[in-house]
Amino acid sequence: MRCKISGKKMKPFMSFGKMPMANGFLDKKNFKKEFFYKLEVGFSKDNYLFQVNDHPKSPHIFNNNYPFYTSKSKFMIGHFKKYFSWAYKKFLNKKSNVIEIGSNDGSFLKNFKMKNINHLGFEPSKNVAYFSKKNFDVNVFNGFFNTKNIRKFKKFKKNTDLICAANVICHIPNLKDVIRSIDYLLSSKGVFIFEEPYLGSMFKKVSYDQIYDAHVFIFSLHSVKTIFKNFGFDLIDAISQKTHGGSMRYIIARSGERKISKRINKILKYEKRLKLNNISSCLKFKKNCEISKRRFKDKINYYKSIGKKIAGYAASAKSSTVFNYCNIGSDQIDYIADSTKEKIGKFSPGKHIPIMPISYFRKNPPDVSVLCSWNHKEEILKKEKSFKKKRGIWISHVK
Ligand code: SAM
């Protein structure tokens, strides 16, 4: 395995075994053709970067049927509205230029559109890009954010005041190309702001399901600061977020152009206490994953042994890692309920559990439901109050 930043050789410290594509929901006729790879993770000592070894190439993942719409979560719609107001107040004015990387269904970009701010989204997945244009009339380029495609937009060259990204930078293996693209676009005082699942939260919650083919990096302040510094950028602020089970918002500016917040040193000290700058925290995480796997399997086996009917709720990409790593399949889980049209009627990657609509879950409630999107727990439990009233039991691999 090689570090995706330094190119240096490194040894994976953990394997999750044979994995399918986390979003590869499939029809029965494709079971035999299903693609698997070995999901291994490593930690680069030079830049403190937690990363996934070998992974399938992006075009297979971000295609015409990307099964993720930000707007499925009301909480996330609210989050992006607040994020917009905060960013506008702090960094923008009516004449600003804004770019979003991975604009998905337009849930964030529509806020800029409503305020008449010149904006552009880069979104390779055709279905969600089309949805955003149709529903919110936002400006979207249907393609990857990279040094080749950005050159098509000369007006944004060294003239972009805000480049933002949420839950997408960890998807892009060629991070160096992303940073070079940012360098090409950002104005002298411009900022790049991105939010991603935070390594500290993943270690604390043992939420190993943050790791899959498309999530190739799990960042910390140590890694972000070190990597961007080598390209002439400062990490000027970082603000923790509740989204996706514990994320971090990183704010990057050209070196010396903006004041560095006192928060940075405070969080760096916290990370040192957790040893996020050292492989020892990874090895502890590995042990915790093994314990979590045993406990979760025991829990499922126990409910099954006393005759309970078990189903999953929300066929997230994350749940593919859990079911495959724990080897839990359709003999234990009857079905997974989901509301995404691209998934319903198909089968879960690797374990081939049928995906049913949410209405099916409400009509045929199981005794026990695995909360696959545990990161949207509050919202789901509120929506499915009647399940608990019918004595339904929610379980999850994350405490
Ligand atoms: N930003 C949204 C959010 O936080 O809800 C969407 C996140 S979704 C997990 C990731 C999005 O990034 C997908 O819509 C995907 O198609 C897009 N994406 C993946 N690789 C990309 C790349 N290289 N350039 C731009 N967008 C990309």
Image (cartoon, helix red, strand yellow):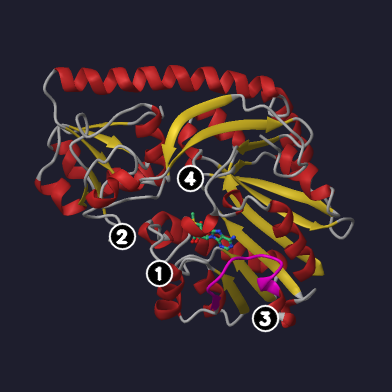
What type is the residue that disc 4 sits on? His
- Callout 4: SS: helix
Which is nearer the N-term, disc 2 or disc 4?
4
Report the disc number at residue 342.
2
Q: Residues within 10 Å of mark 1 (few under 14, many from 20)?
A: many
Give the prevailing secondary structure in the magenta stretch: loop
Residue lying at 73% horizontally and 73% vertically, measured from the top left: 160
Q: CA separation, marks 3 and 4?
A: 31 Å
According to the image, label 4 marks what residue? 244
Which is nearer the N-term, disc 3 or disc 4?
3
Callout 2: CB less than 8 Å from ligand 1: no
Q: Are marks 3 and 2 in contact (CB under 8 Å)?
A: no
Which is nearer the N-term, disc 4 or disc 1?
1
Check residue 147 for magenta coloring. yes
Q: Residues within 10 Å of mark 3 (few under 14, many from 20)?
A: few
Q: Are marks 2 and 1 in contact (CB under 8 Å)?
A: yes
Side (left or right) of 29 relative to 206: left
Q: Nearer the viewer, residue 159 or 85?
A: 159
The quadrant the C terminus occupies is top left
Report the disc number at residue 94.
3
What type is the residue that disc 2 sits on? Glu
Which is nearer the N-term, disc 2 or disc 1?
1
Residue lying at 79% horizontally and 42% vertically, measured from the top left: 226
Q: Nearer the viewer, residue 117 or 255?
A: 255
> In this picture, which residue range is highlighted in magenta?
140-150
Q: Nearer the viewer, mark 3 or mark 1?
A: 1
According to the image, label 1 marks what residue? 127
Q: Residue furthest right?
A: 256
What type is the residue that disc 3 sits on? Lys
Q: Nearer the viewer, residue 260 or 395?
A: 395
